[in-house]
Amino acid sequence: MMDWTNLGFGFHETNCNARCYYKDGKWGKIEFSTSNEICISMAAPALHYGQQAFEGLKAFRGQDGKIRIFRLEENAKRMIRSAEGIMLQKVPTEIFTEAVVETVKRNEEFIPPYGTGGALYIRPFLIGTSPQVGVKPSQEYLFTVFVTPVGAYFPSGFKPTQVAIINSFDRVAPQGTGQLKVGGNYAAGLVAGAFAAERGYAMVLYLDSKEKKYVDECGPANFFGVKNNTYITPKSDSILPSITNDSLMKLAEDLGIKVERRPVEETELATFEEAGACGTAAVISPISVIDNLDNGKRYEYSTDNEAGPISTKLYQQLTGIQRGEIEDKFDWNTIVE
């Protein structure tokens, strides 16, 4: 029996997962497996040259009992962009959609009940699998979708966290793969993340790799700041286009909050009234403190251990839409029948 209120953000076995193979120049039929293991050649390009991409999205059980998958089509489109960026075989939108929806259906019992704060996390991934040792695109691919029930990404939930700027670490190179959702970007942040965690910080706020002047990604999430009734988020070719961030920007405009997506210098951090990181896992993780561990500068946003009013309002609106509590006027949810 699942302890729905204490899931954490980890992997739990479920009924099955979806698989689809690309061979001989075409995609096959979607298959379902009860195994949590995959069998690929030890010479697969995914293992040696990082030819892999993935996505992350969630399904929710609403107050009306219906199951909603949030912004499924946007995740399908982003995986196509990632595939184009590292020469993976693109997964057709119809295969992506069918695999995700059917996997959710077959694992319906693992969707946390409404009111527990949990969700069914959905992880589609695409890997190059043909046996080869040359540095070139794979000839064969495996597209897989697995799911797992999850709780809050951070144990503290929707509470402010402390973030560190560490200039001696880079996440990605300029004109690199920063705007793609590929594993190498996350592997590149593991050392910095561990360094920050050892010092009591939840995440690393990266500055741009070229000038160390502009705000880039915030660990595995996008950064945003709020001031003068304006939602401001950095613009850079090195930042992954977050579907959550895109949703928050649309919600902000709908609520009468101005939106700016533009380069943000580190010095501007001192002018924000609120700050946060946003992504699928946590939706919004409010930030209380940003410490630059290189120059000693500190930027503070919360002194009472509570998120700011605009961050709170946006969080409530987005999660309300996901759980069927608020009208989905943007048609973001896919209802699983």
Image: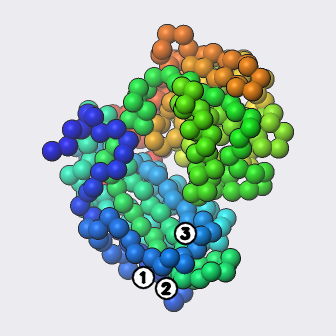
Q: Is residue 292 above or below residue 54?
A: above
Q: Which residue is mark 2?
A: 23
At horizontal 29% and vertical 39% (from top left) the residue drawn is 7
Q: Earlier in the sequence, mark 1 or mark 3?
A: 1
Look at label 1 and name its amino acid.
Answer: Gly
Q: Is residue 168 left or right of residue 129?
A: right
Residue 190 placement: quadrant: top right
Residue 165 placement: quadrant: top right
Q: Are marks 1 and 2 in contact (CB under 8 Å)?
A: yes
Q: Earlier in the sequence, mark 2 or mark 3?
A: 2
Q: Which residue is mark 3?
A: 47
At horizontal 59% and vertical 79% (from top left) the residue drawn is 138
Quadrant position of the C terminus in the picture: bottom left
Tell which tag, 1 or 3, sits nearer the viewer: 3
Q: Earlier in the sequence, mark 1 or mark 2?
A: 2
Foreground residue among 310 and 183: 183
Quadrant position of the N terminus in the picture: top left
Look at label 3 and name its amino acid.
Answer: Leu
Q: Mark yes or no: residue 8 visible.
A: yes
Q: Mark yes or no: residue 224 visible.
A: no
Q: Is residue 232 above or below residue 59?
A: above
